[in-house]
Every structure is written in structure tokens, then in C-alpha cells.
Amino acid sequence: GIQVEQSPPDLILQEGANSTLRCNFSDSVNNLQWFHQNPWGQLINLFYIPSGTKQNGRLSATTVATERYSLLYISSSQTTDSGVYFCAVGSIQTGANNLFFGTGTRLTVIP
Amino acid sequence: EPEVTQTPSHQVTQMGQEVILRCVPISNHLYFYWYRQILGQKVEFLVSFYNNEISEKSEIFDDQFSVERPDGSNFTLKIRSTKLEDSAMYFCASSVRQGAEAFFGQGTRLTVV
């Protein structure tokens, strides 16, 4: 399967700070999603972004498929942003039916 | 907004018992999936289902597991004889087509004792 590496593994921010989370993957992909796992364990869709740049409020994401990485930007962080952020990718070679998840970045925003 | 719903949200079962986890995918979606997440670990793919048959499965999805779409709305995961190591959060997901955005349910936390 595809290897997905996320960095940093842990991140502690002061409320109001900005951050960048990175996702590297080992193969060509045609599906890439960012999720936020909240304290109740739910996986919340943030972005479907196999390529290009998208923005949604304080969050934005960029995927450079040719260089096999994606970035998630969080600006003006809030305590409700705390949780684990997962990157997940799917590949044409695997039929893109299944997503390979990274190990996540655990974000803690302190007031 | 349409969403994937899963029941129950929590289930505790004795080792060796059968469990059935239930999911209602988004109504116009054609691809259905089960994933699991052992506590503190990453989310792992179990199986995908399309056109009333399994289209892919992982090594985790052995003979103890089965999936079914018993009617037009439900999608189920059965574990025949649960083991302690089956304790995990199980997520159902669906997508409108292959490679499209997958939407996840809120999960069923299974505890095997």
C-alpha cells in the first residue's frame, strides 16, 4: 500500500497562532482527504484535495501531487481546533476505493 | 446535509460472541466502506463494497468478518466470533463513485471483554 507520513506528530499552539501540517505520500494519488478527529472520535471532512488549493474559512490546503505532498494551514487557531488531523490518500493503482491514512498530527490549542 | 449514520454508537460484547454493526450510507452513494481504528492508532481500511459485492478487502478482513447490504438502505459489518483484539472504533463510509470524496459516519466503539 501507499505510505503516508504526517508531521509534526504533536503540536501545541497558543490560541490565535497559525500552523502548517504536512502530509507526504509515497505514490501517485487521485484521492487525498484531510480529516479532523474530534475528542468524541468522529472524523470530520475538512478537504477533498487530490491537487490544487482550497480554502474554507480559517483553514486552507494545498496538494502538490507531482511532488507527493499536501499541506494543511490553520490560521488564528481556536481551542475547538484541538484534536487529531489525518491525511488519507487513495491511488489509482489500488483502485482508489480505499484510503490509506497517516498516523496523524495531534494538535492542542491552549487559551 | 446528508450524512452517514451508524448504530449503535457503543457496543460491549463478550469474547466469542457475534456482533453486527449497522450503517446507513448517504442515499445516492454507490460505494461503501468499513474502516477500523484501534485506540491510539491510525485508521485502517477493512473492506469496500460496490454493486452488491466486495470490491476490495484488506488482510485484516479475514473469514471472521462479513458485510452485507440486506436492503436498499442498510450496510452491515458482522464479526462472527469476536476476539479481544477486535476492540476498536469501526467507521462506515460511503462515496458517490470510485475515487470521490468519502464521507464517514460517527463510528461504533466496540469493546470486547
Image (cartoon, coloured by chain):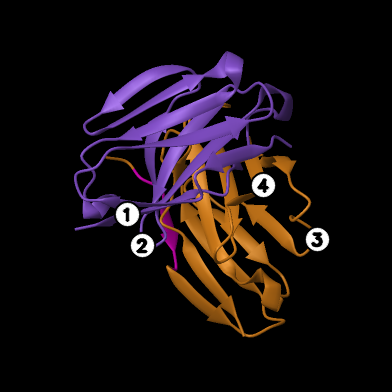
Chain colours: A purple, B orange
On what subunit does the disc labeled 4 rest?
B
On the same chain: label 1 and label 2? yes
Point out the frontmost of discs 3 and 2: 2
Disc number placed over residue B63 in the picture, else none: 3
Q: Residues within 10 Å of mark 2 (few under 14, many from 20)?
A: few
Kindly report the distance in space between the C-alpha atoms of the residues bearing marks 1 and 4: 30 Å
Mark 2 lies on residue: A39
- State which quarter of the image contains the N terminus of chain A: top right
Kindly report the distance in space between the C-alpha atoms of the residues bearing marks 3 and 4: 12 Å
Kindly report the distance in space between the C-alpha atoms of the residues bearing marks 1 and 2: 8 Å
Residue type at mark 3: give it: Asp
On what subunit does the disc labeled 1 rest?
A
Range of residues picked out in magenta: B3-8
Mark 1 lies on residue: A82
On what subunit does the disc labeled 2 rest?
A
B21 left or right of B61? left
Mark 4 lies on residue: B47
Tell me if I can see residue A99 in this picture: no
Kindly report the distance in space between the C-alpha atoms of the residues bearing marks 3 and 2: 32 Å
From what the image shows, is residue A25 above or below residue A110?
above
Q: Considering only order in the chain, which callout, 4 or 3, is on the residue closer to the N terminus?
A: 4
The residue located at (42%, 60%) in the rendering is A41
- State which quarter of the image contains the C terminus of chain A: bottom left
